Amino acid sequence: MEGFSALEGYFERVKVEPGWYDGEKVRGMIETFGPVFVRHLTDEIETITPRELAEIFPVEKDLEDNFKAMLAWIVASSSKLTTFPFVPLHCLSLGADLDHYSS
């Protein structure tokens, strides 16, 4: 997806030079591919139904451990200026305990 690649490249530059960040520019970039991306994500939902996840992770604790490891990686590897502000909001909406991952 061309627009997504452009956004990714933009954020790579912002990681190096945070002063380049422009919220309006980001919004405009997202709007170029947003509808296609939302459709893609909507289609992906069917691949992570409880039934599908049970086939991948027959032991529920394995799924929980995998989710915790993924969240810890996201928090540890995200930029505090660009990516990270979205993580807590999303995770809190899922009922996550972010204090667990802040060590």
Image: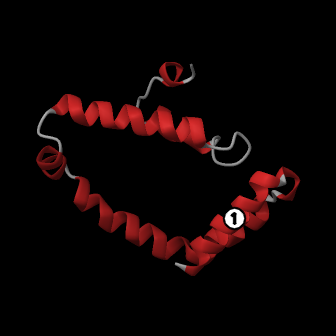
**Residue at 62% over, 68% down:** 30
**Which secondary structure, mark 1?**
helix
Q: Quadrant of the C terminus?
A: top right
Toward the bottom, the furthest residue is 2
Q: How many marks?
A: 1
User: Does residue 85 appear anywhere in the picture?
Assistant: yes
Q: Is residue 60 left or right of residue 72?
A: left
Residue 89 visible in the snapshot:
no
Q: For label 1, count other residues whose C-alpha is less than 10 Å away and answer few (under 14), some (14-19) or many (20+).
A: few
Instruction: Say which residue appears at 51% left-offset and 24% top-offset.
Output: 101
Q: Residue at 19% of width from left, 47% of height from top?
A: 53
Here the colouring is secondary structure
Image coordinates of residue 95 in percent, x first then y, are: 41, 29
Kind of residue at disc 1: Arg
On the image, the x and y values in percent for residue 100 come to 48, 19
Quadrant position of residue 29? bottom right
Q: Is residue 94 left or right of residue 19?
A: left
Decide if residue 11 is on the left or right side of residue 73: right
Horizontally, residue 72 falls left or right of residue 2, namely left
Q: Residue at x 53, y 19 (%)?
A: 99
Q: Which residue is mark 1?
A: 27
Q: Position of residue 65 (x, y in %)?
A: 30, 30
